[in-house]
Image (spheres, helix red, strand yellow):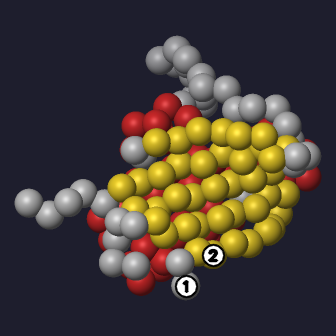
Amino acid sequence: MNCHAMDFTVGTHSAHHIRRIVRIYLCQWGMTELTDSAELAVTELLANVVRHVPGRHCSLLIVRQGRGVRVEVGDPDPRPPVVGEPTQWEEGGRGLLLVEAVTDRWGVHPSPPGKTVWFECDAKAAT
């Protein structure tokens, strides 16, 4: 299988279970070097759903593409995520900055009635 999709309502402990699912797929696909980045990025996207989406309903899509992975988190809230510029004293607002730092690409696109936030991680070529 080269992709996995699911719909669910995010709870406080959902990120732990989703990280495990992402890790399992990456290991099956021989991309274990991507697990840390993908797990951190998907955790941040799920945290945004918990904080900002009424009802906390979302979808998850994990897609193998070549020597990399694309992960999409969709939700019914049409408001785009905002990349924060927190001060050093603020506890939150760094999630998308982390996603940007640990992935090769990320973005957002409308997917009525809401949006899909996605990221891609590329496996590094062996040298």
Label 2 SS: strand
Q: Which residue is mark 1?
A: 1
Residue 107 in the image, given as x and y percentages of width and height: 59, 39
The residue under label 2 is which amino acid type? His
Q: Position of residue 118 (x, y in %)?
A: 60, 48
Q: Quadrant of the N terminus?
A: bottom right
Q: Quadrant of the C terminus?
A: bottom left
Which is more toward the observer, 55 or 70?
70
Q: Secondary structure at mark 1?
A: loop
Above or below residue 107? Residue 122 is below
Residue type at numbered disc 1:
Met
Q: Taking the image as drawn, is residue 50 in sight?
A: no
For image coordinates 72% across by 47% down, the residue present is: 116
Tell me which residue sits at (20%, 60%) in the image: 125
- Nearer to us in this view, 43 or 92: 43
The percent position of residue 49, horizontal first and vertical second, equals 75, 47
Is 104 displayed left or right of 80 in the figure?
Answer: left
**Which residue sits at x=40%, y=44%?**
104
> What label does residue 4 carry, if any?
2
